[in-house]
Amino acid sequence: MVERAKRKRCAIYTRKSTEDGLEQDFNSLDAQREACAAYTLSQAIEGWEAVPELYDDGGWSGGSMKRPALVQLLDDVKAGQVDIIVVYKVDRLTRSLADFAKIVEILDENEASFVSVTQSFNTTNSMGRLTLNVLLSFAQFEREVTGERIRDKVAASKKKGMWMGGPVPLGYRVEERKLLFEPSEVESVRYIFDRYIALKSVPKLVDDLAARDFRTRKRTMSSGRVLGGVHIRTGALTLMLQNPIYVSKIRHRGELYDGEHDPIISQERFDQVQAIFSHNRRDKTLGKRSRNPSLLTGIITDPDGRPMSPTQSKKQSRTYRYYSTRLKPLEDKTSAWHLPAGDLEQIVIEAIANHLSHGLILDSEDEPLNEGMIDQYRQTAKTLSSTSAIEQRKFLLRCHTKVQVEAQAVKINLNLEEHQDPIVISVDAKLVSKGSELRLAVAPDNGPAKHEPDPVLLRLIANAFAARDYLIDGVASPLVSDYSQRHLKKLARLSFLAPDIIKAIVQGSQPVDLTGRRFLRAGKIPLDWEGQRTLFGFE
């Protein structure tokens, strides 16, 4: 008795690189599927049986694995629903040797195989795999050579000034692969360039065009979808104003070539527009157009080495500025740092000014500078501390300054002179809570840095004495009239602090991490002054 062959489920996969001809009753995909079905039927004695599911990728290139039907097919293989993949030719499955290796790996892991009906081999034996690798190498070689040939043809055509396709710029139409004027749009293009020269601002120009109800050209895609017909946006307008096509130039890989078409805009007017863009970019870099220019934009990194960008938040009528970590897509938002901008900028400027004013700079041979250079640096320090934010940012950019925020320090790296080694200045600083704000506090041992009294601590001390007078002598005070008995007792404890602790708070020289919240949360404040100094970090 003849043993019946084990059932093998066969999935037929078809592909065509373009959509041309797919609308026909019998197209390339149908021809591939018919040949594969006939081959599968011929192997019925081996237990081969075609699955009813259709795996067709019409209009998808074989250079990528991101094809809907192929993705579904591989998922079905992993799910154990397919035993053999049947294709008309190897290159229908993939043209990439690397992608083929991935597919074979998936087949091996799931005890499946692959068969080409026009090439007599499969992946169930080593000789079949060798032949497949050779064929795919040639297929990939052919694809790469074809790509290089197309790129060379496009480059040669653009060097001759020919239009090589793409979205047709406003003001032109295409006839026989040549750009010609579109009379209904030419004047609109000239108005846009002239208006930008007058306004010198793309956002203002966007508003101006919207007020005139200017809309983009409508385009109908091959799928029937209609694009355009909307108010022009900032990005599209910027690209248009910088497009050399309007002065009869063709751009290719950073180079400009004379075009075959006629210009809409004169070269002089186009150059004037580019000069305004260049000026605006320079002003933006220096922060001239910002009400609160951020000195450290582009030069500061967080404790994890990630770049930081200026951000703002509003609470009631107050605006708070921060430098926040610039996160990558899908990066954990809770890992971001948000540091007070004003404190950071003050630390950097004061640290550099203090370094210069004290003549702490050495020349390239580690020898002390002469008196003339020291005087020059001291004058720079004096100017830096008193000048505007714009001038301070110019100085930081000129010195190629880099600011690295660390857990308990801020490190500043700058080059004052080209021939000198980079200078590294480190400032001890801690992130502390002062009231409802986060502040960066500088440690007292960082030279003659400026220390300002903490208003939260000052108010707390004043309330403490008012609470003690009320509890002991019954003297009422508006400072504590609304407080509960429990809170009054907690406040009164602070009136018994050591005199030197209170003096330090008044002068602003207390430890950087000593906050009002820490005072109030202290479970038991020692009555002896030495114990108080130890508890609050004065020793």
Image: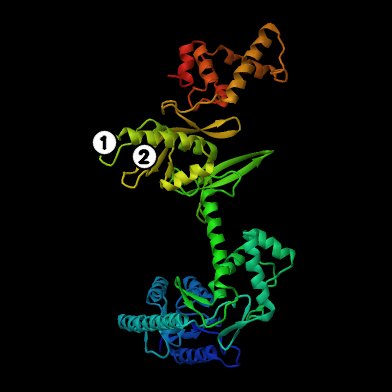
Task: Examine the image and state in which quarter residue 20 appears.
Answer: bottom right
Q: Position of residue 85 (x, y in %)?
A: 45, 81
Where 111 sits versus 198, above or below?
A: below
Picture quarter with the N terminus: bottom left
Residue 408 position in % (x across, y down):
43, 35
408, 309: nearer the viewer:
309
For badge 1, the amino acid type reads Glu
Q: Secondary structure at mark 1?
A: loop
Question: Residue at (49%, 85%) from the top-left corner?
Answer: 49
Q: Which mark is residue 424?
A: 2
The residue drawn where x is 50% and y is 54% is: 328
Q: Quadrant of residue 112?
A: bottom left
Nearer to us: label 1 or label 2: 1
Provide residue 422's location: percent of width, then percent of height. 34, 43
Question: For mark 1, what is the residue?
Answer: 367
- Image side of residue 402 versus residue 51, left or right: left
Q: Is residue 509 visible?
A: yes
Q: Is residue 191 above or below residue 367?
A: below
Q: Mark 1, residues whose alpha carbon is within 10 Å: few (<14), some, or many (≥20)?
A: few
Mark 1 → mark 2, Cα distance in angstroms = 17 Å
| As drawn, 458 above or below 170 | above
* Residue 351 visible here: no
Q: Residue type at mark 2? A: Val
Q: Residues within 10 Å of mark 2 (few under 14, many from 20)?
A: some
Task: Tell which circle, 1 or 2, labels the residue nearer the N-terminal end.
Answer: 1
The quadrant of the image that shows the C terminus is top left
Q: Say which of 524 and 463 sits in front.
A: 463
Nearer-the-camera pick, 201 or 469: 201
